[in-house]
């Protein structure tokens, strides 16, 4: 059994040991407690003390439609779903791919964007799976990219870093040959460090990204889905997406 599978099975086993706040309890408090990992530009990152980015603004807009204020709780990515099941958050928005494995441990709202894992490397570096043979690849711990990289045949080694910024830094300092990450995160990294002459290579897989809620906390998932449905329909999602990406990144 893979490490992530063991972890998620453990998570699934601890379900139901405490009760999460349902939507009525959240409403009564006026505050939606949201877990995220704010080192993931352009989705969630910090500007001074403020958490900003596409998902940060989306969460705040969703909360507003529910008549709530967001209380952010930043945490390491690999602790977020565990924290959710320990009732540390009402929801988690951190670009989680909706995978069957994660669905055993948590519930997901309808997807709020679609993207995928891509190879990011210097222009003269390994930009295809074939070219990755024998090479060193950076990934972020606990991500779908880490899982995919570990399953690619013939890689020299897969180096795991606690967050995206650290993994990108390893690519910039040439301690790794390539970095597997989200397509939009790769585009952002390429723009931010033009001197590194990075290029996006082969897309390895596509994924639907969703907000996670504690398993069985159906009133919260329903409230998120209603608010998100409104934003998708009334143009506000499109406007926010275009602000960050110049395009509408909803799942089509
Ligand atoms: N989409 C990837 C995953 O589901 C990355 C998540 C965000 C990492 N900061 O694992």
Image: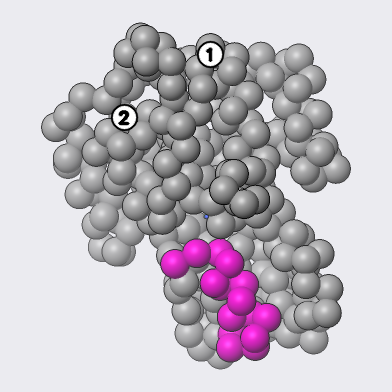
Task: Tell how many labels.
Answer: 2
Identify which residue is drawn at 44% across, 47% down. Answer: 74
Q: Nearer the viewer, residue 210 or 87?
A: 87
Residue 66 bears which disc, if any? 1
Q: Is residue 61 above or below residue 158?
A: above
Q: Residues within 10 Å of mark 2 (few under 14, many from 20)?
A: some
Question: Which colour style is shown?
Answer: one colour
Q: Residues within 10 Å of mark 1 (few under 14, many from 20)?
A: some
Q: Earlier in the sequence, mark 2 or mark 1?
A: 1
Identify which residue is drawn at 41% across, 56% down. Answer: 76
Residue 147 placement: quadrant: bottom left
Q: Is residue 224 above or below residue 241?
A: above
Q: Is residue 215 left or right of residue 98?
A: left
Residue 215 bears which disc, if any? 2
Residue 186 bears which disc, if any? none
Mark 2 vs mark 1, foreground winner is 1
Look at the image and tell me in which quarter the C terminus lies: top right
Task: Write down the region rendered in magenta.
Answer: 162-177
Q: Is residue 116 visible?
A: no
Look at the image and tell me in which quarter the N terminus lies: bottom left
Instruction: Say what secondary structure mark 1 lies in.
Output: loop
């Amino acid at each position: 059994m893979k490490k992530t599978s063991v972890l998620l099975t453990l998570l699934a086993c601890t379900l139901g040991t405490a009760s999460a706040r349902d939507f009525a309890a959240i409403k009564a408090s006026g505050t939606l407690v949201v877990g995220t990992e704010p080192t993931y530009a352009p989705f969630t990152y910090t500007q001074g003390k403020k958490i900003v980015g596409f998902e940060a603004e989306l969460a705040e807009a969703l909360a507003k439609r529910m008549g709530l204020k967001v209380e952010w709780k930043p945490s390491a990515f690999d602790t977020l779903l565990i924290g959710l099941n320990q009732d540390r958050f009402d929801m988690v928005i951190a670009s989680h791919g909706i995978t069957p494995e994660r669905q055993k441990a948590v519930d997901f709202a309808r997807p709020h964007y679609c993207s995928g894992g891509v190879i990011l490397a210097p222009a003269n570096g390994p930009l295809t799976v074939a070219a990755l043979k024998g090479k060193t690849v950076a990934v972020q711990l606990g991500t779908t990219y880490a899982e995919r990289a570990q399953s690619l045949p013939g890689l020299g080694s897969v180096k795991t870093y606690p967050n995206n910024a650290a993994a990108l830094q390893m690519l910039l300092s040439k301690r790794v040959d390539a970095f597997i990450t989200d397509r939009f995160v790769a585009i952002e990294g390429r723009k931010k460090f033009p001197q590194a002459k990075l290029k996006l290579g082969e897309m390895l897989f596509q994924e639907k990204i969703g907000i996670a809620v504690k398993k069985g906390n159906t009133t919260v998932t329903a409230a998120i889905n209603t608010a998100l449905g409104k934003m998708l329909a009334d143009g506000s999602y499109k406007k926010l997406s275009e602000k960050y990406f110049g395009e509408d990144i909803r799942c089509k």
